[in-house]
Image (cartoon, grey):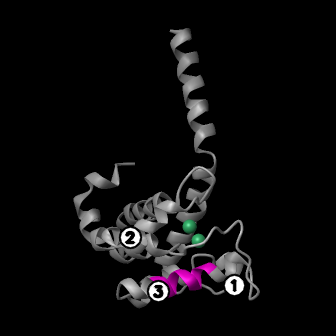
Amino acid sequence: MRDWREDTEYVDIVSDLLRDPAVQELGQYVQHHHSDRLTHSINVSYQSYVLAKRFHLNARAVARGGLLHDLFFYDWRETKFELGTHAYIHPRVAYRNAEKITDLSPMEKDIILKHMWGSTSALPHYWESVLVDMVDNYQAIAEFFTPATERFKRIKQRKTRKAN
Ligand SMILES: [Fe+2]
Ligand SMILES: [Fe+2]
């Protein structure tokens, strides 16, 4: 996958959000073991954007909704809620925070609110929401295992060098 910073079309779509202090603050929170929440959000946003373009979906909504889908400011491993689990609560918290910093289209709202639809049972209205949810799940696993993946790649490279 191309570096998102080099994709000017993508950067144009999300640059106002990336400049926002609330979005920048996500960089201070660990998300999936080896990644911070800002890196995770950009990964989800950009990968969803690339796939949305390929499948002729609304790439702009996916890029912006994806970037804001986890806009919450607490450590999800430590904070407990009386009203429900983190999986149930945080899409609503992210939506409330997101609407404070930008106008959200109905699709962007759905993308943020439904990105945990497996746990919340609120079905997505758009394919774009399904896409972001799938990329989010994939990224969570990929980010968790990143160091193991890199270690494996290095071992493989060493073995290939020896064999040649
Ligand atoms: Fe999330
Ligand atoms: Fe996420």
Question: Sequence order check: which comes first, mark 1 or mark 2?
Answer: 2
Kindly tell me whether mark 3's CB lies below 8 Å from ligand 1.
Answer: no
Question: Sequence order check: which comes first, mark 3 or mark 2?
Answer: 2
Residue at 57% over, 83% down: 93
Task: Count how many numbered circles sit on residues in the image.
Answer: 3
- Residue 53 visible (yes or no): yes
Say what secondary structure mark 1 lies in.
loop
Which disc, if any, is residue 121? 1
Q: Which segment is the magenta one?
A: 90-97
Is residue 73 rendered to the left or right of residue 23? right
Residue 81 on the magenta segment = no
Tag 2: Cα neighbours inside 10 Å, few (<14), some, or many (≥20)?
A: many
Say what secondary structure mark 2 lies in.
helix
Residue 105 in the image: x percent, y percent? 38, 88
Residue nearer the viewer, 128 or 10: 10
Which disc, if any, is residue 109? 3
Residue 130 in the image: x percent, y percent? 54, 74
Identify the amino acid type marked 3.
Lys
Identify the amino acid type marked 1.
Ser
Question: Do the residues bearing badges 3 and 1 touch, measured as CB atoms within 8 Å?
Answer: no
- Mark 2 = which residue? 63
In three-dimensional space, the C-alpha distance between marks 3 and 2, rounded to whole angstroms, equals: 12 Å
